[in-house]
Amino acid sequence: MDLVRRIALATAELKADDSLDELEGVDPHEFAMHVIWMEEAGLIKAIVSEYLGDHPPHAAVLRLTWDGCEFADAVRSDTLWKKAKDKVLIPSTSWTFGVLLDWIKAEIREGLPTLGGGV
């Protein structure tokens, strides 16, 4: 999920006519697979070529979707992301992407005085 977060945040910073086809320090195959999964989850629009013979997948992220923008905004805070990793993304537990996003949104709502009951 750290790589999904990195891809989402890097994509959020793209100029309108740019694309993202790599991240520093990330294996190109691993990058492509995460982009494929993120596109399947509806977070991004991308150009993807999956395995073609002996050629590994390649992917270029074009932009975030509406859901991708919400995800990027929700995970932008390093403090909140660390808390999510400690509370939700525990290696020995089961979780889904939806559970993670719902938890992050709830944390954001609780932190906003006008939405979290602090009125």
Image (tube, rainbow, N blue to C red):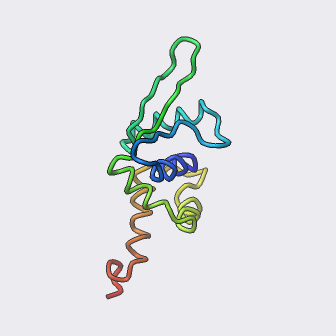
Whether residue 23 is situated above or below residue 115 in the rendered picture? above
Report x, y in % for residue 44. 40, 42
For the C terminus, which image quadrant?
Answer: bottom left
Q: Residue furthest right?
A: 25
Q: Is residue 55 left or right of residue 68?
A: right
Q: Is residue 27 left or right of residue 40?
A: right
Report x, y in % for residue 51. 51, 19
Which of 95 and 61 lies nearest the eye of the viewer? 61
Kindly identify the residue that appears in the image at 40 percent across and 37 percent down: 39
Kindly identify the residue that appears in the image at 50 percent across and 53 percent down: 9
Which of 58 and 1 lies nearest the eye of the viewer? 58
Which of 65 and 103 lies nearest the eye of the viewer? 65
Whether residue 114 is situated above or below residue 46 in the rendered picture? below
Which of 78 and 102 lies nearest the eye of the viewer? 78
Kindly identify the residue that appears in the image at 46 percent across and 23 percent down: 49
Determine which quarter of the picture holds residue 31. top right
Report x, y in % for residue 82. 59, 63
